[in-house]
Amino acid sequence: MLTIQQLHKSYTTPTGATDAIRDISFTLNEGEFLSIVGPSGAGKSTLLRAIIGLERATGGEVLYQGSPVRTPQADFSVVFQDYRRSLYGWLTLEGNITLPLRHRLRDRAKRHEIATTLLARVGLAGMGLRYPGQLSGGQQQRVAIARALACQPRLLVMDEPFASVDAQTRFELEDLILKLKQESGVTTILVTHDIDEATYMSDRVLVLSRAPAIVIDEVNVSLPHPRDQMTTRGLPEFARIRSRLLAKLLTTRTETRSIPIHSGVK
Ligand code: ADP
Ligand code: MG
């Protein structure tokens, strides 16, 4: 579905050019849940912005169904870490959720129906007329997730979406995303610095080195579905994968070449 080919990105700063991404290649399969982990400053957000067409790479290419991605795509939706900046405080929850539909769907009643259904799916039934400022952080992120799903995206991309909420809320949001993923089958990329989260959520995990980023490991996660915070995290397979990811992250400085990624899961 998505092919990342030898992606390279350097930023021009007052002190010269710095490489954020050295060379990244991988493919994403339809319906897959892929996590990308890496230390802070590795180049994860840079990679994500290039994937969704928000920022041009300085080398290589992103192909979506065979065509280069150079501008934001109608088929892609994004959830960012900071819900405070991603929701509009002067719009109701329903207004926020239906915003991306304004131009695509003229029928107001239909838009209202979609918002009502989505609010229920993210656990905020009946709250459409509230404003973001009247919600907790976790609830606001639920609204951002509902908005991302409003256009029925083919690809859902999330950049550290749970990094600004408390641990309990984080578990709840992880399970919400897994439930929504199960229901819609949407292909998903999750960027996170949290290896436990990556292991718990994914079908496959890519590990990035420190900047300038390369891919230093790829792990298929064959933990059974549906996943459960208590049971899944207690499985020997979970422990094995997280140890491997941790070991990779701790030794990231020693790697110099990207590993070849041939295919995804199965
Ligand atoms: P991560 O999301 O993994 O924490 P980023 O992609 O945000 O990492 O950043 C990777 C590297 O690129 C960092 O060294 C960062 O300082 C640099 N960088 C990111 N955005 C810019 C920018 N707009 N201009 C210059 N340097 C940037
Ligand atoms: Mg980031």
Image (cartoon, rainbow, N blue to C red):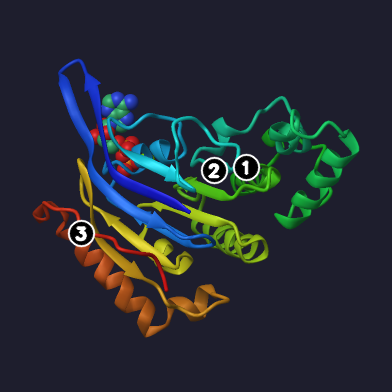
Residue at the image point whose x is 15% and y is 18% from the top: 15
The correct choice, above or below, for 240 with respect to 258 in the image is below
Task: Tell whether circle 1 marks a residue whose Cβ is less than 8 angstroms from ligand 2.
Answer: no
Q: Quadrant of the C terminus?
A: bottom left
Residue 127 at least partly seen = no
Disc 3/disc 1 C-alpha distance (Å):
34 Å
Q: Residues within 10 Å of mark 1 (few under 14, many from 20)?
A: many
Earlier sequence position, callout 1 versus callout 2? 2
**Is label 2 in a helix, a strand or a loop?**
strand
Q: Quadrant of residue 129?
A: top right
Q: Is residue 123 left or right of residue 53?
A: right
| Residue 144: x %, y % from top left | 62, 42
In the image, which disc is placed on residue 259? 3
| Residue 131: x %, y % from top left | 74, 34
Residue 76 or residue 166, whichever sits in front? 76
The correct choice, above or below, for 56 with respect to 148 in the image is above
Residue 44 or residue 128, whichever sits in front? 44
Amino acid type, residue under disc 1 in the picture: Ala
In the image, which disc is placed on residue 144? 1
Residue sitting farthest toward the front: 66
Earlier sequence position, callout 3 versus callout 1? 1
Circles 1 and 2: CB atoms closer than 8 Å = yes
Q: Residues within 10 Å of mark 3 (few under 14, many from 20)?
A: some
**Is label 1 in a helix, a strand or a loop?**
helix
Amino acid type, residue under disc 3 in the picture: Ile
| Residue 229: x %, y % from top left | 52, 73
Amino acid type, residue under disc 2 in the picture: Val
Q: Which residue is mark 2?
A: 79
Residue at the image point whose x is 76% and y is 32% from the top: 95
